[in-house]
Amino acid sequence: MSSNLGQAGGYATAARIGRWIIPAIPFGWTWIPEFGIQKRAEAVVPSNISLREDQLLAGDQLALYIKAQITLMKRTFLEPVVAGPAPLEFPGAAEAALLMLKHRPMHQLTVFQVQHYVRSGKWIGIATLTTLESELLKIRPDFDQFMKLLRIEPEAPQDA
């Protein structure tokens, strides 16, 4: 895996988290196995991009899954403000959506999360940028570039 986006490695050498394929990470970010990437900055809480997976339990609609996630967010976070979901395009996905969340954790700093939900069959991939609201404009271009390179492994064919 390359840490320079201009020199992305091939998929054979790419890092993986489940079905997520991570061929490269932005300059200045650090790879954290089984989690994603993190960017440390002087005197600021680190920003991170986590990659997770889940499964649809019923149906094949991403919208119902996201609706349940929003309900959980509203119960979990202090003063949550949710924007979205909005449709997205993602290579190899049946559907994808963008959701943004702003909230205050215990330390009273405003945290901003940008979440991409990606569905392929019953598989759900969730890529979440978490950063301080004050860092968002500096960090978001790296997240957008990372998302352009990120791929999902195609579903293995089912035996008939």
Image: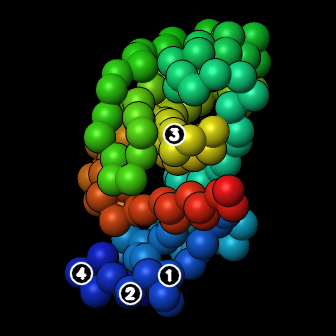
Q: Report the residue at 75% width, 28% height from top.
A: 57
Q: Mark 4 is on which residue type?
A: Gly
Foreground residue among 143 and 102: 143
Residue 14's label in the rendered image is: 1
Q: Earlier in the sequence, mark 1 or mark 4?
A: 4
Residue pushed farthest front?
160
Q: Which residue is mark 4?
A: 6
Q: Report the residue at 52% width, 44% height from top.
A: 120
Foreground residue among 128 and 133: 128
Q: SS for tag 4? A: helix
Q: Mark 1 is on which residue type?
A: Ala
Q: Report the residue at 23% width, 81% height from top.
A: 6
Foreground tag (4 vs 2): 2
Q: Earlier in the sequence, mark 3 or mark 4?
A: 4
* In this view, 6 is above or below 146: below
Q: Earlier in the sequence, mark 2 or mark 1?
A: 2
Q: Report the residue at 67% width, 15% height from top.
A: 68
Q: Mark 3 is on which residue type?
A: Arg
Q: SS for tag 2? A: loop
Coordinates of residue 44 in the picture (x, y in percent)? 53, 52
* In this view, 147 is above or below 109: below
Q: Which residue is mark 3?
A: 119
Residue 72: quadrant of the picture:
top right
Coordinates of residue 54 in the picture (x, y in percent)? 70, 42
The residue carrying pointer 3 sits among few (fewer than 14), some (14 to 19) or many (20 or more) residues within 10 Å by Cα, namely: many
The residue carrying pointer 1 sits among few (fewer than 14), some (14 to 19) or many (20 or more) residues within 10 Å by Cα, namely: some
Q: Specify whether 111 is left or right of 138.
A: right
* In this view, 101 is above or below 153: above
The residue carrying pointer 4 sits among few (fewer than 14), some (14 to 19) or many (20 or more) residues within 10 Å by Cα, namely: few
